[in-house]
Image: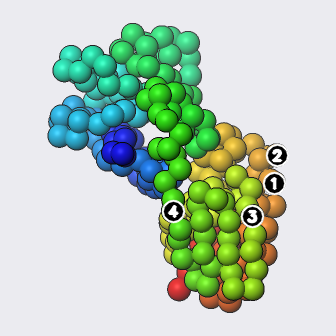
Amino acid sequence: MKKPTILYVEDEVLMAKIVSDSLQSRGYEVVTENDGANGLKRFKAVNPDVCLLDIMLPHKDGFTIADEIRAVNSTVPIIFLSAKSEVTDVVMGFKSGANDYIRKPYSMEELIVRIENVLKLPDEVTSVPSEWQIGQYTFNTQRQTLLHPLSERKLSYRESELLKILYQNNNNIVERRDILNLLWGSDSFFNSRNLDVYITKLRTYLKLDPLLEIITIKGIGYRFVTP
């Protein structure tokens, strides 16, 4: 079965990478674009199954891109992802031909459900097996298990998603704000304390491999150091 292809137009580079990596781990093909001026051109080249469009983009906004896409394709699903949350913005989004409108910040869980809804995908699409080797551990992203020769652990949904984000950006800094917005939907104080707990849990789970380390970058975020 062909994997659905997503065109994702977003000018925040780190956010685009985290979201696209998460979508790819779920079995989607993702093509990203950070310049609104290239939105329609990239759409024609890719012929995606669904479009994710930010609104505030350089050179051409998401509303205009949606209008241009609708002029050449009246059926492809379009989802706006935007920090613009006024009622007038949402109404304008749907008038531009959007199938859905998600206010930032949002969680990956919400985004996946919204994409599945507009595509009306069968369950098989999200059950693509995926195993990653992280040092001495084997991380199964579908079963949410973390295996080591000396231990086996079942991860919760957020533990699994957090490990995905850190590993997909291994040896690079990931900002706390981006993690919080993707996994909890906001960077509130309460959610921030929850993130601290989850980071502590992952450090405990990974302690059997001394070459793995989740380093706190004070005031910024985390860097997952791997061999």
Foreground tag (3 vs 2): 3
Secondary element type, mark 1: helix
Q: Check contact, mark 4 vs mark 3: CB within 8 A.
A: no
* CA separation in Å, label 4 and label 3: 15 Å
Considering every residue shown, the one lying at the far bottom of the view is 210
Image location (x, y in percent) of residue 68: 23, 21
Of residues 162 and 90, which is closer to you in this image? 162
Q: Looking at the picture, does residue 210 appear above or below residue 124?
A: below
Foreground tag (1 vs 4): 4
Would residue 95 be visible to someone looking at this image?
yes
Q: Amino acid at mark 2?
A: Phe
Q: Amino acid at mark 3?
A: Lys
Image location (x, y in percent) of residue 227: 53, 86
| Residue corresponding to mark 1 | 193
| Residue corresponding to mark 3 | 154
* CA separation in Å, label 4 and label 2: 32 Å
Q: Check contact, mark 1 vs mark 4: CB within 8 A.
A: no
Q: Which mark is residue 72?
A: none
* CA separation in Å, label 3 and label 2: 25 Å
| Residue corresponding to mark 2 | 190
Q: Residue at x 47, y 28 (%)?
A: 120
Foreground tag (3 vs 1): 3
* CA separation in Å, label 3 and label 1: 22 Å
User: Which quadrant: the N terminus?
Assistant: top left
Q: Check contact, mark 1 vs mark 2: CB within 8 A.
A: yes
| Residue corresponding to mark 4 | 130
Q: Residue at x 75, y 70 (%)?
A: 153
Which comes before the other along the chain, label 4 or label 3? Answer: 4
Q: Neighbour class for label 4 at 10 Å: few (<14), some, many (≥20)?
A: some
